[in-house]
Amino acid sequence: MSAPPPLPTTTHHGKGAAGLALLVALALACTVAPLLNDGAGPLRADRDPVLTALTDGRGSLSFALLSGLLGAGLGVAWSGLAIALGDRAERRLMGAAARLVALPLALLVPLGVGLTGGGLPVLTALVALSAAPLVAGLAHQDLRALLRRDFLTAARAAGRSKGALLLHHLLPNAVRPLLAAGAIALPRALAVESLASLLGLGLPSSVGSWGGAVGVAARLGDGLALVPAALLLALSLWAFHAVADEALRLAAEGPHGGPSNGLPGGSAPDARP
Amino acid sequence: MTPPTHAATAPSPHTAAAPVSTQALTLLAGDRVLIDRADLRLDAGQVLSLTGGAGTGKTLLLRALAGLPLPGVTLAGQARTDGRRLLIAQGGRLAPQRPLALQAADVIGHHLGLDASAALRRMADALDRMGVPPAARRFDLPPERLPDSLRWAALFALGIAVGPAVLLADAPAAGLDPTVRLRLLHRLAEWARSSATALILAGRPEDGLDGPADARLCLHEGRVLPTPPIPDPLPAPDHAHHPAGAAVMTAHGLTMSFPMGTGPTGEARRLTAVHSLDLELVDGETLVLLGESGSGKAMLARALLHLPAPSTGRVVWMGRDLTKADDATLRRVRRDVQPLFPDPAGSLDPAMTVGAQLTAVLESLRPDIPADRRPQRVVETLRAVGLPTDTATRWPASLRPLEAARVGLARALMPDPRALVCDEPLATLSAEDRAEFWDDLLTARDRRHLSLILTTERAEEGLRHADRALVLLMGRVVERGSADDLLHHARHPYTQAMLSAARGDRPALEGDPPSALRQPDGCTLRQRCPKARSFCAQAVPTLEPVGPGHAVACHYWDTP
């Protein structure tokens, strides 16, 4: 048999592509910025505020990536465990996730750091934990929808073993929705870390952070230092959200243009005229 | 009134008096002709059905008559409507979260200039017309929290309350059970006749709109044509196919129930979808399971395949008890008994090509076929169901509904089964595609001597090709017999209502099916049944024989 023909792509991915391009550009700029800086200290009045803000971005973006990925992993593991443990445990675990999502977890991070004395590992764990319930809820919905799909029933009717079901049917179709659910953890991690740093309870000043830079600039009344950091933070949050939205949309489309949520999609049983 | 079948097809000298008339109405999108010189005329109090497949221009024509042509569509010729006109848009669109009372007050107030209380009184009168009992009138609820049937009834009532001279309904009550849909449409048509409103019901041929109509037109390739008469909507069963032989599948005391948590007193609650049901399938037989949505037919079909296994009871295939079967035995049974799903596209793995999925079936169920012969086998099976061989390289998302249905059939036929359990396999297909797929399915049945179990809510389709039928209501069999018996001598009011709906007549059942969570005591049909008496609330009727092979579960089946 010949290779499967590609499907024509008709979807527009403008917002997601713009978000991704912006994130790449920011990451590159943040990486290059220290090379352009003359090593000026953070409080020197003659430093370039944009270069300083870009330098601070290294800390914010790296930390968002680290804690976001950790939160995403925790959330996905949470939902997977809930489903694997059976009905009662699933109800309890997902009920707990729903209750936690309703809480202002972003405020609990600086509180936790303040109470425990802080430190990067503690902050990372707290930020990841603040993002995990939301990811768990989304991942659980996606996994449940996937498990209800008739193609899995059809595969069972075709005598496929449990291992084959998992490896050949469930996992390939779960990757997109789980990645999409996990993607939402990145902007959340960045926002939560920035809030904590703004309050002086986030990343240490040696690491640098947009939230911390905004906090220091606000305390010093330094508008020139505040604007670039705040602007870059806002741009990064928009870009992360745009990428996460796009990931959710792609996940809803499913692989090869098919629906991933059981709803009629590309090959819909013809929509009424 | 002008004779209906002609009134809607040709302009008459009295065109000026007709609320709806068009002459050579042509709809164009740029240079492309969408509707070509449509001539139609509708008198006051006349009901017209306008049917056509997907994309034939029904919505375009209705919107043009409503004075709401789609952007980019230009009109040529003449289209005239007299008096107030109202369009019920496709899908029965109401603001999903705004309480019904506010929407009714807005719409009726806008058209008639009434205040909110007068508008709601008018709406209540209209709901009376639609047969919605006072207890079911939930004005305070938003439409998204209403059952579909009540939402449609409210929408029709809104139209009635406004009292237009011309009411245009696009795909009215689509998606409802035929019994419920036909009841609502007949009530709407009766109102239109009594209030001298010109009513156009537009939809697909299979929606049963011709039944309540006085005049029938269809759209075909942009032309408005008279609907060809249907010789007999309920023909006799196909007697060329005679099943004979021993029972290949039996089910005893099969029950499907699901935990529903605990009740207020701490007792475990369960939702029972199928109640202790017995079934037998004879070699080569076609057995149809008829029932409305929620009757348990799909759950029964899946339980027969152990997808999932029944809660209690047992299924025996060729002497093998599936309840006690190990993996190898179950795999052997799956080789013999294959399913067809209600959404064929959804039953295909979107991440695998068609060929890969068919090959996987062979790997699992036919390990005796060498790997190098599998591609040839895939190609042969695709050809056998009328698909080109390059379908094997396609992704499921690129398949049209009929192609997806055929791929589903090909997958089921791959292991050379002896029986197919088909759960509404035509549910997503248009009328034309249904006819083609029926041919494919029956050809496969006859050539391979397959036994078929087929679930459907369409009595006419099911009984036409079946040998025997079970009629299911809320998880219980209420009538069973040969297809011929059920077609011509149905005894149960529920079966009779389904057959009435299939003929386009008004079903005798009133109201909607009760919720599975709050089933009434005794007979579950009694709240809708024209024969119901007080005793019906006291005992669940059991099947009693009324003829050879024909049994009915109704306390008063023999009363007029």
Image (cartoon, coloured by chain):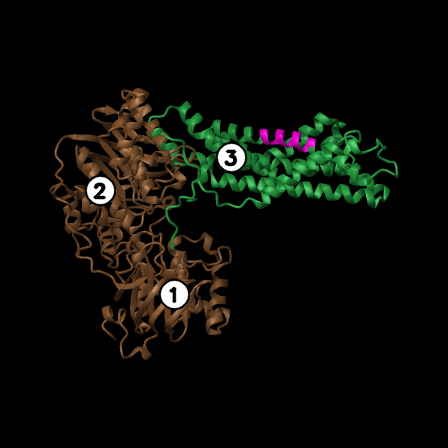
Left or right: residue B162 versus residue A194 is left
Where does the image place residue B170, in percent across and percent down from the top left? 37, 60
Are callouts 3 and 2 both on one chain?
Answer: no
Q: Which residue is mark 2?
A: B542
Instruction: Say what amino acid the circle numbered 2 marks.
Output: Thr
* Label 2 packing within 10 angstroms: few (<14), some (14-19), many (20+): some
Q: Position of residue A136 (x, y in %)?
A: 56, 34
Amino acid carrying mark 1 in the image: Leu
- Colour displayed for chain A in the image of the structure: green
* Depth order, front residue of B398/B14: B398
Residue beneath label 1, please?
B27
Q: Picture coordinates of residue B213 (x, y %)?
A: 27, 64
Q: Nearer the viewer, mark 1 or mark 2?
A: 1
Label at residue B240:
none
Q: CA distance from mark 1 to mark 2?
A: 58 Å
The picture's colour for chain B is brown
Does any portion of residue B511 appear in the rendered image?
Answer: yes
Q: Nearer the viewer, mark 1 or mark 3?
A: 1
